[in-house]
Image (spheres, rainbow, N blue to C red):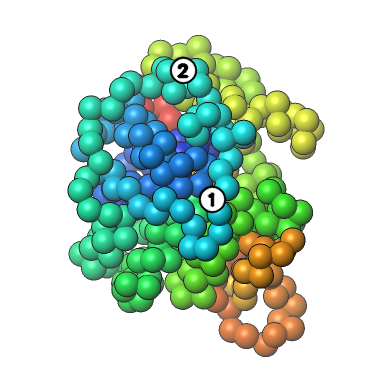
Amino acid sequence: MAQKLLIDTDPGNDDAIALYVALADPSVDVVGVTTVMGNTTLDNATRNALALLEHVDRTDVPVIPGAARPFSDELVTAEEVHGPGGLPEHVREALPEPTQEPVDGNAVEFIVEQAREHRDDLTIAALGPQTNLALALAVEPRIAEWVDDIYLMGGALTVTGNVTPMASFNFYVDAAAASRVVQEATPKLVGLDVTERVYVSTAEIERLQGEPEPLSTIGDILAFSIDEVRDKFGNDGGLASDAVLVADIVAGLLDYEDAYVEVDTTGGPSNGATIYDEHGVYGHEPNCEGALGIREDASYEDIVVGRLEELA
């Protein structure tokens, strides 16, 4: 039986690729997409999710809006990275107009309901800020006991951040929510330690851009970070950070280590930083698993591109 997967997301280019990979893989059954502010506003994130599902004829997957702002901080988005409205303008224009409406209700209720119904048949993948998941845990703390795994896209345990020198974007946007989930959910953290180490090659992206829809637009989405990768890392390819997390769910891409982690919520220059007690200074038991390596026998590009091609 396919593993049931609930995706909490703020699409976002890399969120889009992650969603496509999950939809294409027969080993998972996407039970719903809950949306959250982050890469863009909640309204834009919800519309993007609906359009992405329309693009690959998966309007059977419900979309449920969630939090429109962080717990206490002012909303910070990443539209300067992803494009106005959360996706590059030419991608938004290429995607079909959604015919599906968001489901009545809210993301917190949906997360709790799905966890209660599916129990350990369900995996939760939080690809954006953790606000929805933190609120769901506040309503029903047993979620962490019920479900199989909770994955968080965020953190920088042994490397520097990408929005401040200390913090990854998803944890920075709502540090209080990230802290709550790390403290209560025993999650798997998939952060910058691994997401900036794997790419889809430029040659493969250009090949996808030359294919019929939906692959051509998927290639355009992957192409959004080619210049950044070349300038920042000196590598040839495109990042799709959230897809690293989904690639692990569907094919076991990553190596994890038990870790004790705290998330800084002081509001200062280290706000949102992941404080990783690598050497056990605190003497605390691990409260999460941190992805710190890529399996030598796994190919990120093969996993991602192989699934994407199933959408053709």
Residue 69: x %, y % from top left:
46, 53
Q: State the residue at coordinates (28%, 54%).
A: 106
| Quadrant occupied by the C terminus | top left
Residue matched to label 1:
75
Crowding at label 2, few (<14), some or many (≥20) Cα neighbours within 10 Å? some
Q: State the residue at coordinates (72%, 52%).
A: 164
> Which is nearer the N-term, disc 2 or disc 1?
1
Q: Tag 1's secondary structure?
A: loop
Q: State the residue at coordinates (58%, 17%).
A: 206
Q: Along the line of sight, which residue is nearer the eye, 131 or 215?
A: 131
Q: Is residue 295 visible?
A: no
Residue 216 circle label? 2
Q: Identify residue type, mark 2.
A: Ser
**Callout 2 touching callout 1 (CB < 8 Å):** no
Residue 127: x %, y % from top left:
48, 50
Vertical side of 201 occupied by 45: above or below: below
Distance in Å between CA atoms under marks 2 and 1: 32 Å
242 with respect to 234 (left or right): left
Residue 139: x %, y % from top left:
32, 72
241 with respect to 128 (left or right): right
